[in-house]
Structures are given as structure tokens and as C-alpha cells.
Image: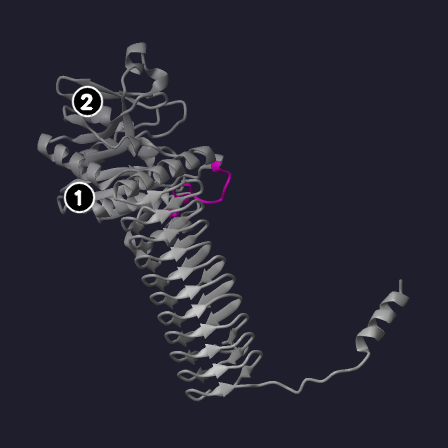
């Protein structure tokens, strides 16, 4: 890929039919903004010099791209050609090269298409190379007109003859231009249409009329033309992406017993032999090992999961789960946690920013927060690590082979020593020595006849 290549991404659209204050390119497909898909495709194709044209809610776009890209403002939405005009000063600094023009709300452009189209563009010496696709139903798209020496034009559906409507090669809205030729064409584009807008497609005719060569690269990726103008279209994008990910994973040896409610991000990696059950959502840079069972009804985000792990109705975020762990149902693993090998975590347990050592059992109804727990520790029902004093959070240490009795409160900062026990109902406010039993209980008193008096009083009110 030429190091003089750059890209302009058009991301100024409002998307009125979305009925939202969010710019259209920021709507998500598989948990990522459409704009992210487009920027990533450029970067993967080694086109890293990128200018994003922002418009509606420009601050949202600018905040998202940060220092990753240059941004320019299109104050009024007056067509695709007008949007590119906003980047003219930026392009003038890059005259000696080629520029890729992409739509920020067409997320399925891919690095392979970008690379192959540029190779054809430079090999043929084209002024412009249109990225196209051949589809079964071209209705609604601009058709590509070809002649003996490349592309002769683009005709829109409403202007096409019957023969032209039969053409199945359509314009994706993505182009490679020689930067200098594009700037020449932009100077001549006029808003001579019913919308009063500047159309980038007019640049193709302008360059052809000036004797420059235009051609088209037919992408093998038929989804390259897909975009979304409304919520229905956005759902179609998500369905298309979701099915593509699932099909790729099945080809790699991942098993799906049912795909109802299953959504897996495009960057998620899953090992062979793993089963994904219904209702499972895997997001971000999650990595799942081999021979796991994930689901039903799990949400795993930015986690690393080892081999042979079982997760049942688990939500886990930014954490590590090692080989052979068995977790769930109804478990919440919050960021910064490390669940080590062969740990068992049962129902209604929350773990936050904690290390749980190998073969430890946290069976049910327990909160473990800001804690370092050793191996072979047993938590009884209802244990709470009291890690917050109202101003600061403190850590708790529980060493190997400890036994934490039911309804124990561990008030941080505190340490439970190796092989130590806490009796049921104990509130621990001091370190427990190795091998000791901590008991903290007041005397059990009885008030004779109390229940009878209360019952008589209640019955008297009826």
C-alpha cells in the first residue's frame, strides 16, 4: 500500500429517520459505531492518514475520533461533493498521492477491498476508481455504465432506461481518486439538480470529459454497499454482521446449539469445541478458550476466558477467568477481577476487583470486593466483604485453605490467615491468625411470652 495514500470519511449525516440526536455514523453495529468499522478498515489496509468530515452533532464525532484522525466541519449538508470540498485544504497538502473517499455509515467496507481497489487504480493509471458490487437486486442504487475503455458513467435509478436498470453492478459510494484530479473535479461540480446539492458522482463525469480514465473495482464483498437510513436498516446491518460472525466461528470449530439472542462482536476470539448457548452476548476484545460452555444468557465484555470454562447466566467485564472455572447462574463479575483455575462460583454472587485463588468455592449469596483470596478457600452463604468505609475502599486478604462461615462480615482492611476459620454470623474487624477460629457473637437471650403478646396485640386490631 502506498504511503502517500490517505482517506476522507464522510460522517456529517444526521439520520433524521433514526429519530435520534446521535449522528448517523455513530449508531452501532455489533456494539461498535459504524464510523469505527470504516476507520478500522482503513487502518487495516495501511491507510492511516484519515480526515473525517463532521457535521450534525460535530462534537460527538470529534470526541470519538480524538487524536486518531483529523476532522473538518461541514456546516451545512449540501451533498457528498460539498462534504469532500470541506477537506480541500487538507487534501492540498497531500497532492502527490491517492485519496480514498468513504461513507461513515457504510460499515462493511473491508481492508481487502480497499487494498485491491488501490492496486487496480494505480496499475491502470486511473483518475478515479469506483468501488462497486454486483448484487441480485440493484433496485435503488446507481448503475455502473461501462465502455471499451473502462467506466463511462453512473446512472441513478430514476434516470435509468429499462436496459440500464437491468445492470447489476452498482455504486457503493466509495472511490479511489488521484488527489490532484479530485481537486480539479471539485472545482467544477455545480448544484444543478432538484436538491440544489453538490454530488460527488458528478466528478466521475467531469474527469471522463477531461479525457482522464475512470474504471471500477468489483468487490467480492457484496455487503460493501450496505448502509442504514432508519432503524429497520440498522437492524438489517446488525443481522448481517451477526450472521457473518457466527458463520465464521462455526467454520473455525465453534458450536452453536441455538442462535436466538446470540450476538458476538467481530473482534471476539473463540477456541474450537466451545459451545455458545442462546442469549449469549460477547463484546469487545473478549477471548474465549477451547471446550467451554458459554450461556445461556451471558454477557461477557473485554474478558479473557480459559479452556474448559462453564459460564451460566453470567455478566463479566474486563476480567480474567482461568481454566476449568464453573460460574453461575446469576453471577456478576465486575472489572479488575481474576478468577483462577477450577474456581466454583454459584448463584447470586458478585465479585469486584478481586483475585479468587485456585479451587476456591464461593457458592451463593456472597459479595467479594477488593479482595485477594487464596486457593482452596470456602465461602459460606451470605458472606460480605465490607470494603468501603464511606470515604475510602480497603482490601481484604484471605489466605489458602481458609473457611469463611455463613453470614460472616469481613470489615476491611483485615486479613484471614492460612487455614483459619470464621464462625457463622461473625463480624471480623481484626486479623485472624493462621489456623485460628474467629467467633464474634453476643449472648443469646430470651424474652418469655414476647411472641404470644405480639400475636394477641395484632389479633386485637382486626
The spot of residue 421 in percent (x, y) is 47, 82
Helix, strand or loop for disc 2 = strand
Helix, strand or loop for disc 1 = loop
Q: Is residue 271 left or right of residue 415?
A: left
Circles 1, 2 touching at the beta carbon (< 8 Å): no
The spot of residue 85 in percent (x, y) is 29, 38
Quadrant showing the C terminus? bottom right
Quadrant showing the N terminus? top left
Q: In the rendered structure, which segment of residues is drawn in magenta?
A: 18-32
Residue marked by disc 1: 5
Circle 2 crowding by C-alpha within 10 Å: few under 14, some 14–19, many from 20: many
Circle 1 crowding by C-alpha within 10 Å: few under 14, some 14–19, many from 20: many
Q: Is residue 174 left or right of residue 282?
A: left
164 in magenta: no
Q: Nearer the viewer, residue 418 or 279?
A: 418
- Disc number for residue 151: 2
Residue displayed at 46% across by 33% down: 232
Amino acid at each position: 500500500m502506498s504511503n502517500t495514500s490517505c482517506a476522507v470519511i464522510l460522517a456529517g449525516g444526521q439520520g433524521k429517520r433514526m429519530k435520534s440526536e446521535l449522528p448517523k455514523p455513530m449508531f452501532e453495529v455489533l456494539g461498535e459505531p459504524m464510523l469505527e468499522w470504516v476507520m478500522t478498515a482503513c487502518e487495516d489496509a495501511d491507510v492511516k492518514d484519515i480526515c473525517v468530515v463532521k457535521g450534525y452533532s460535530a462534537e460527538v464525532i470529534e470526541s470519538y475520533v480524538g487524536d486518531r484522525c483529523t476532522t473538518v466541519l461541514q456546516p451545512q449538508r449540501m451533498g457528498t461533493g460539498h462534504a469532500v470540498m470541506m477537506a480541500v485544504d487538507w487534501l492540498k497538502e497531500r497532492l502527490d498521492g491517492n485519496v480514498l473517499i468513504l461513507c461513515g455509515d457504510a460499515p462493511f467496507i473491508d481492508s481487502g477491498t480497499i487494498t485491491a481497489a488501490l492496486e487496480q487504480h494505480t496499475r491502470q493509471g486511473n483518475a478515479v476508481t469506483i468501488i462497486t458490487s454486483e448484487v441480485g437486486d440493484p433496485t435503488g442504487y446507481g448503475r455502473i455504465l461501462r465502455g471499451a475503455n473502462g467506466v463511462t458513467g453512473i446512472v441513478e435509478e430514476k434516470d435509468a432506461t429499462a436496459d440500464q436498470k437491468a445492470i447489476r453492478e452498482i455504486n457503493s459510494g466509495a472511490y479511489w481518486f488521484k488527489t490532484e484530479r479530485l481537486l480539479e473535479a471539485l472545482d467544477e461540480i455545480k448544484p444543478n439538480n432538484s436538491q440544489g446539492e453538490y454530488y460527488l458522482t458528478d466528478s466521475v463525469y467531469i474527469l471522463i470529459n477531461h479525457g482522464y480514465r475512470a474504471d471500477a473495482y468489483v468487490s467480492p464483498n457484496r455487503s460493501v454497499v450496505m448502509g442504514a437510513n432508519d432503524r429497520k436498516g440498522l437492524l438489517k446491518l446488525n443481522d448481517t454482521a451477526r450472521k457473518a460472525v457466527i458463520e465464521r466461528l462455526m467454520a473455525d470449530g465453534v458450536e452453536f446449539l441455538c442462535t436466538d439472542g446470540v450476538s458476538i462482536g467481530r473482534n471476539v476470539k473463540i477456541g474450537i469445541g466451545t459451545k455458545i448457548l442462546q442469549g449469549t452476548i460477547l463484546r469487545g476484545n473478549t477471548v474465549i478458550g477451547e471446550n467451554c460452555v458459554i450461556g445461556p444468557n451471558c454477557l461477557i465484555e473485554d474478558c479473557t476466558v480459559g479452556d474448559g470454562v462453564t459460564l451460566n447466566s453470567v455478566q463479566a467485564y474486563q476480567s480474567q477467568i482461568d481454566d476449568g472455572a464453573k460460574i453461575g447462574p446469576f453471577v456478576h463479575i465486575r472489572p479488575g477481577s481474576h478468577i483462577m483455575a477450577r474456581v466454583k462460583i454459584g448463584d447470586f454472587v458478585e465479585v469486584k476487583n478481586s483475585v479468587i485463588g485456585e479451587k476456591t468455592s464461593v457458592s451463593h449469596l456472597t459479595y467479594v470486593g477488593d479482595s485477594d483470596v487464596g486457593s482452596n478457600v470456602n465461602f459460606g452463604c451470605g458472606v460480605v466483604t465490607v470494603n468501603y468505609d464511606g470515604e475510602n475502599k480497603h482490601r481484604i486478604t484471605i489466605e489458602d485453605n481458609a473457611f469463611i462461615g455463613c453470614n460472616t462480615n469481613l470489615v476491611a482492611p483485615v486479613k484471614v490467615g492460612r487455614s483459619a476459620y470464621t464462625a457463622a454470623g461473625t463480624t471480623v474487624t481484626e486479623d485472624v491468625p493462621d489456623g485460628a477460629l474467629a467467633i464474634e457473637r453476643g449472648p443469646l437471650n430470651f424474652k418469655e411470652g414476647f411472641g404470644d403478646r405480639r400475636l394477641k396485640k395484632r389479633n386485637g386490631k382486626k
